[in-house]
């Protein structure tokens, strides 16, 4: 069963706008990760945030984590057509490499040129 | 530095047949995990191999089995295929190479059962 729920399921924006995706989860976690998937192919790791962190940045990506609300958000600033993809959050419960991940259903982002 | 390699890319099998999917992990990684992703859904964890043993298993029947070889590569075997086994099968590797807790995923094998 899926741990996370992403919101919205689909998002369509214009190039240059910001995109925000949200993720909620149910159990205690050690870390939360965001992945991108293009056209049903492999997943690309974007960013990881640990349970003791509240915010993390990587380039145009900003991730927040609220463990009290069991939720996270991914913000992509100044979006580009190349950002069009499905975005998944995934939670890990162990502080070890190779922690099994539980994925949400994903958000389909479309960035229109 | 090669990433995770999966083969074959696409596969069509008949219901009841058996299939073997293969995965070579990223250089330096010693742990391999397999995920099943049905169309329009997020990936679901099948199992994980480390030191040639199954260490963790998701909620999948015994028809799904695997193996890890001494060179860390891995196979996923599915017996008695059902139509519902049609999915993208993703292999992910990880290890103590400074990647933190993030995985490196392969491009997947698209299995179609007819």
Image (cartoon, grey):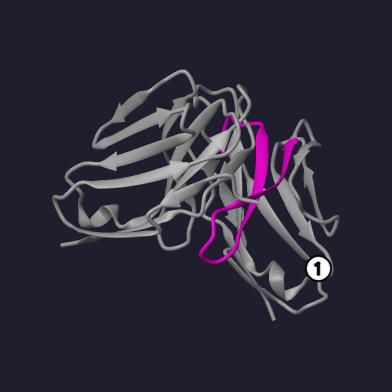
Outermost residue, top direction?
A52
Left-right relation of A35 to B15: left
Q: Nearer the viewer, residue A39 or A101?
A: A101
Residue shown at 70% from the left, 67% from the top: B85
Where residue A109 appears, x then y in whole percent? 32, 57
Residue B26 spot, x, y in % from top left = 56, 38
Compared with B88, A90 (above or below) is above
Residue labelled with disc 1: B18
Q: Which residues are magenta?
A: B26-49
Q: Can you give x and y, in whole percent of width and height, for residue A20 in the image?
A: 29, 45
Name the residue rendered at 13%, 50% in the picture: A16
Q: Seen in the image, is B81 located left or right of residue B108?
A: right
Tell me if A61 is positioned left or right of B96 in this view: left
Q: How many marks?
A: 1
Dot 1: chain letter: B
Q: Is residue B79 magenta?
A: no
Q: Position of residue A38 (x, y in %)?
A: 40, 57
Q: Residue at x 83, y 75 (%)?
A: B16
Quarter of the image where the C terminus of chain A is located: bottom left
- Which quarter of the figure has residue A63? top left
């Amino acid at each position: 069963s899926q741990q996370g729920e992403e919101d919205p399921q689909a998002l369509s924006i214009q190039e240059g706008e910001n995109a925000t995706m949200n993720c909620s989860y149910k159990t205690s976690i050690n870390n939360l990760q965001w992945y991108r998937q293009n056209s049903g192919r492999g997943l690309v790791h974007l960013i990881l945030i640990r349970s003791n962190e509240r915010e993390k940045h990587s380039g145009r990506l900003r991730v927040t984590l609220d463990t009290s609300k069991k939720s996270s958000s991914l913000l992509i600033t100044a979006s580009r057509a190349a950002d069009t993809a499905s975005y998944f959050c995934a939670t890990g419960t162990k502080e070890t490499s190779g922690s099994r991940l539980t994925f949400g259903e994903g958000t389909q982002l479309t960035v229109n040129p | 530095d090669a990433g995770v390699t999966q083969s074959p890319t696409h596969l069509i099998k008949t219901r009841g047949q058996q299939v073997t999917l293969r995965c070579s992990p990223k250089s330096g990684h010693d742990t391999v995990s397999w995920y099943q992703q049905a169309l329009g859904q997020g990936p679901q964890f099948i199992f994980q191999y480390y030191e040639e043993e199954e260490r963790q298993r998701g909620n999948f029947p015994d028809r799904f089995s695997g193996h890890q070889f001494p060179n860390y590569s891995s196979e996923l075997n599915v017996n008695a295929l059902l139509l519902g086994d049609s999915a993208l099968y993703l292999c992910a590797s990880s290890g103590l190479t400074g990647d933190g807790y993030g995985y490196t995923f392969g491009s997947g094998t698209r299995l179609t059962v007819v």
